[in-house]
Image (cartoon, grey):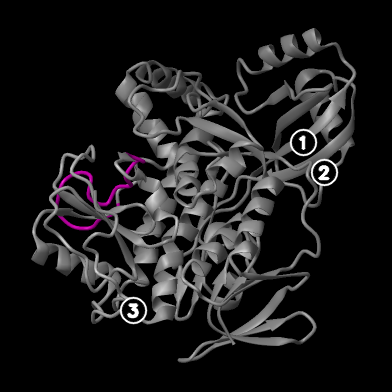
């Protein structure tokens, strides 16, 4: 019997498996596809918060060497603005990287930590009771686990089997996207594309090296099935008056503009994450990032439930925190899609917003929204930093994020008076009077969000219990925090 079965080994499922393995949870990942996707699949953008998460787990360098960094400015609705001043992060660029590379690196990471991955296994049924979940696979095999997480994409079988509502707007228009060669002279292509983009902000036909172009074409209406190179040529002739001599596609894709959010992320012992819980148009490139952040929010909480130390309502905070975040992403993608419209009213709003974004605070607020560094969970009254993620900091003993690699929480104490005795199996402890903080001490959750700010031991103990359960008795297995990381 497994502790957790995950349906889907995309970025969300692989990241979640790795997070669970940091806590020795027995994990099986079921992936319905028998083989990984081709390397020639669309480039995705890893945003600031996702790069921070990867840094917290010691992974970011693996990704940086496979991607190309580009400015984060201009991410909102494609409005061309510089990167705003004052972004509170070491990672102020987007990382363009092929999605199969992301999936492969995360899958390898999960396997390195001990997760089992079974390709070619599709979930077809599930039943749950007070003790666990029975998962049925195509072919009739049945597996037993304590929990099941559906990370199986927009058409999630797990979500449908649960009967969880997926309200929102259906697809009304398609977008064709792909990479292909073109015979037309580059200067002719550039001139025509510049002309089209005066009124159509979605259309793109940009060079991608070695005579290859990345193409994005909006299409009125919805079609079924994978697109062909003839579909691209036909739409190009309709919009540009020429197909630019496109041929030899590397990959082609079609996606709709459906916008939907699951009514709930948890039903008993079954949970949803990633595209199984939310879908939206790709404006701003937020989808994959939203799923990774779901996984890091859920992983330590589900592990705590499995390991038996979770406070009673901890697992419910997954829905309480992440559902509003997804709702906000859906709203900002709706806004960006509207701003891309060629209608006079939408273009008037776009011109007004373009002017307002010359104000650095406006530009920064929108970029913080797109890149997820502006998220603040509601942890109750307190300083503005409470509930927010904390940027990486220089400490006397390395960097802050280095102390989060094991998936535990972290107590950062500038006073030298505090202790986390009773919780050091779940919370690391660093004392550093030189830390660049405006507060005496703070408590970080494993996802890097600030769970407590203060200076008094009793108050700290209450919040350690709130997030990390009851303390354990002192033993050799639960060493004192005194001297643990102290400077």
Q: CA gap, disc 3 to disc 2?
A: 50 Å
Q: Which residue does the image show at 35% across and 19% down from the upper left?
A: 356
Element on which disc 2 rests: loop
The residue carrying pointer 2 sits among few (fewer than 14), some (14 to 19) or many (20 or more) residues within 10 Å by Cα, namely: some
Magenta stretch: residue 378 in it? yes
Residue 376 vertical placement versus 483 (above, below):
above
Q: Which residue does the image show at 50% across and 68% down from the upper left?
A: 20
Q: CA gap, disc 2 to disc 1?
A: 10 Å
Magenta stretch: residue 75 in it? no
Looking at this view, is 344 or 191 the one in front? Answer: 191
For label 2, the residue is 227
- In-image side of 452 versus 225 (left or right): left
The residue carrying pointer 1 sits among few (fewer than 14), some (14 to 19) or many (20 or more) residues within 10 Å by Cα, namely: many
Element on which disc 1 rests: strand
Q: Which residue does the image show at 37% across and 62% down from the upper left?
A: 408
Nearer-N-terminus badge (2/1): 1
In the rendered image, the quadrant that contains the N terminus is bottom right
Q: Is residue 472 visible?
A: yes
- In-image side of 258 versus 322 (left or right): right
For label 3, the residue is 309
Q: Which residues are magenta?
A: 377-393
Q: Which residue does the image show at 70% across and 37% down from the upper left?
A: 220
Q: Is residue 152 visible?
A: no
For label 1, the residue is 178
Is disc 2 in contact with disc 1, using a CB cutoff of under 8 Å?
Answer: yes
The residue carrying pointer 3 sits among few (fewer than 14), some (14 to 19) or many (20 or more) residues within 10 Å by Cα, namely: some
Residue 57 vertical placement versus 116 (above, below):
above
Residue 163 vertical placement versus 376 (above, below):
below
Looking at this view, is 309 or 311 the one in front? Answer: 309
- In-image side of 10 versus 405 (left or right): right
Q: Residue 441 appears at what percent x and percent y? A: 17, 51
């Amino acid at each position: 019997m497994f502790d957790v079965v995950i349906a889907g080994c995309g970025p969300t499922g692989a990241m979640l498996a790795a997070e669970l393995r940091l806590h020795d949870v027995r994990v099986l990942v079921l992936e319905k596809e028998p083989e990984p996707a081709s390397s020639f699949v669309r480039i995705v953008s890893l945003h600031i918060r996702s790069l921070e998460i990867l840094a917290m787990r010691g992974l970011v360098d693996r990704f940086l060497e496979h991607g190309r960094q580009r400015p984060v400015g201009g991410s909102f609705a494609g409005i061309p603005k510089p990167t705003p001043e004052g972004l509170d992060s070491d990672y102020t660029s987007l990382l363009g990287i092929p999605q199969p590379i992301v999936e492969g690196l995360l899958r390898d990471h999960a396997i390195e930590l001990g997760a089992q991955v079974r390709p070619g296994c599709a979930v077809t049924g599930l039943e749950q009771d007070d003790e666990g979940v029975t998962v049925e696979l195509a072919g009739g095999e049945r597996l037993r686990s304590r929990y099941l997480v559906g990370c199986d994409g927009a058409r999630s079988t797990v979500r449908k089997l649960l009967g969880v509502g997926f309200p929102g707007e259906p697809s009304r228009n398609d977008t064709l996207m792909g990479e292909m060669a073109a015979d037309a002279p580059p200067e002719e292509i550039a001139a025509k594309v510049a002309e089209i983009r005066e009124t159509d902000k979605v259309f793109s036909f940009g060079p991608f090296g070695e005579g290859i172009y990345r193409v994005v074409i909006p299409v009125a209406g919805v079609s079924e099935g994978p697109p062909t190179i003839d579909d691209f040529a036909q739409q190009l002739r309709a919009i540009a008056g020429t197909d630019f001599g496109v041929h030899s596609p590397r990959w082609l894709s079609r996606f709709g503009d459906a916008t939907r959010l699951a009514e709930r992320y948890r039903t008993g012992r079954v949970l949803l994450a990633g595209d199984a819980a939310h879908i939206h148009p790709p404006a701003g490139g937020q989808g994959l990032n939203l799923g990774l952040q779901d996984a890091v929010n859920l992983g330590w909480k589900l592990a705590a439930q499995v390991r038996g130390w979770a406070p009673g309502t901890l697992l419910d905070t997954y829905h309480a925190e992440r559902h509003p975040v997804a709702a906000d992403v859906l709203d900002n993608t709706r806004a960006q899609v509207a701003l891309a419209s060629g209608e006079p009213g939408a273009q008037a709003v776009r011109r007004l917003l373009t002017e307002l974004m010359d104000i650095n605070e406006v530009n920064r607020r929108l970029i913080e929204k797109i890149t997820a560094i502006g998220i603040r969970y509601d942890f109750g009254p307190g300083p503005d930093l409470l509930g927010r993620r904390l940027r990486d900091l220089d400490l006397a003993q390395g960097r802050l994020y280095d102390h989060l690699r094991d998936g535990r929480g972290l107590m950062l104490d500038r006073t030298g008076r505090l202790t986390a005795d009773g919780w050091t199996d779940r919370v690391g402890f660093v004392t550093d009077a030189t830390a660049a903080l405006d507060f005496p001490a703070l408590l970080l959750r494993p996802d890097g969000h600030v769970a407590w700010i203060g200076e008094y031991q009793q108050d700290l103990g209450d919040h350690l219990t709130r997030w990390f359960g009851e303390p354990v008795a002192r033993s050799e297995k639960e060493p004192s925090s005194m001297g643990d990381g102290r400077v």
